[in-house]
Image (spheres, grey):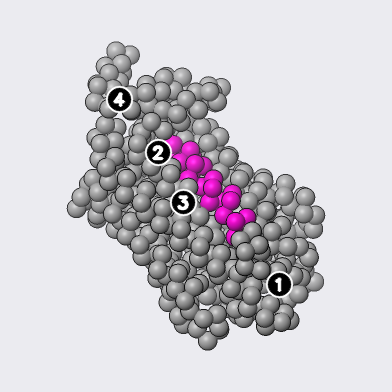
Amino acid sequence: SSATSLGALVRLGSTNPLQQNAHMATEKLNGKAGITEATVTKAWSFWEKVNIMCFLCLCCVLCGVNSQLLPSSFRGLETSLHTSLETLTMQSTCQGLAQVLSCPFWGSLADHGVSRRQMIAFGCLMWGIVTALLGITDDLKMMTVLRLLNGAALGMVMPIVQSMIADIAPPELRGRLFGIALGAQNIGVTFASQAATAVSSEIIWGFYGWRISFGVVGLISVAASALMASLMLDVPRPMRTSNVDVVAELALLRDYMNIPSFRVIFIQGIFGMFPWSVFPFLIMYFQYIGFSDKMAGSIYMVFTLTNGIGQVLGGYIGDAMSALSPDHGRIATAQMSVALGAPSIFILTGVIGKDTAHIVWYCLLLANLGLGSSWCGSGCIGPILSEIVSQKHMARVYAWSFTLQSFCGMVFAPTAVAFMASYFFDYKSGSADVSTMSRERRETNAAALGQSIMYLSLVPWALCFLCYGLLHRVYPRDKKSA
């Protein structure tokens, strides 16, 4: 209509040249998808928001459990399947690759009218079935196929979760809701790191414990899928799936890449995701130091639990810093977070001796690492993305952002740990239980993992810190032009 066209002209007139193409693509895709402001904007009541957030958090918890099952079971898989660390990290790489590559597809379906409630329910159902199947197979090729399917199912979670949060919350409150969702995900990671690690090498009812944990998580996910499909609220949107156009989607990505802040977020994510993809190897690190499977999981649980608290805390800190300095507060929050995390991982893996007597120091450093290094996503990246792009394309924007940021970290980081530990620091895989290894071999493997984790955390974080500095210059201008 003429009013819509006039509104588009006014918005285009207020943008800088780099963002005009993105707005043109936005209007073009809106018309093609039949999406208008009226179809994506709704006044939510308090209890409707509670309903949506509860189910989003449930989904995030299950996503966290599922994503942590594999690294928590590395030693059990290495022993029972007589395989190497390189093979297991390749499984993790395949899952991560499928997860990041599938995100834009799910985001496009959500923005073109497919029910996000049904998509989340389908995702839970899909990874529930796949996880149960992973618990009963011994064939590594079949495991690889199932890992690809599992990653594809996990790929739909965060774009949809973050787009729904952007729908129900104003900009000044989004940081804390992003933090709550990410904190819920870390509750799942915490549970899996404790429970799955403790039983991974145990024999329960004649089966290895990792098989039992995979089966239980699969059944719970299927049950949760049924609850989401029947009880969760959703935003009604006109169905336009026939208008999904790969060329147009790539054109939209190209035009958003012309926004400097989006480019900086993409570049920092390449480095920033590396540490988070190597931290799960701390479980094996503690096992080689000499802790039992259960104790290693308990120590790592300190990190995942405080990390979940830190995600929520980061959202509140980001909102508060934004109120003090709208143009620089969120960016400063992210830089403080990186600066707090780096010393902890350096001392943990490079300074303190590798001995079970240092358990208190391990826990204190992991607590500091979890609380301090986890503010970036909820306090900075999520809210900033919601302010520089069109809300009508929020699912796709978060999907592309997650894909571009996570690709290097989730796909290459696990393999990089195995490669560096094996070829630079003399790590040797084996089917023997850690307790039966020679002390020399156990200490060498622990040192190899520790050095690999340290280098693959500190160097990317330093580059990430510098990238955040660029946001101070470009974000204020992009926010005003959006």
Q: Residue furthest bottom?
A: 357
Magenta stretch bounds: 397-418
Q: Earlier in the sequence, mark 2 or mark 3?
A: 2
Residue flagged by tag 4: what amino acid is it?
Answer: Pro
Residue tagged 4: 17
Element type at marker 1?
loop
Residue that carries the numbered disc 1 in the rendered image = 201
- Residue highlighted by disc 3: 271
**N-term-proximal mark, 2 vs 1:** 1
Q: Nearer the viewer, mark 3 or mark 1?
A: 3
Picture disc at residue 263: 2
Q: Residue furthest left?
A: 324
Q: Where does residue 46 sit, x and y in percent of width and height?
A: 33, 48
| Observer-nearest of 39 and 174 | 174
Instruction: Please say if 450 is above or below 335.
Output: below
The secondary structure type at the circle numbered 3 is helix
Badge 2: how crowded within 10 Å, few (<14), some, or many (20+)?
some
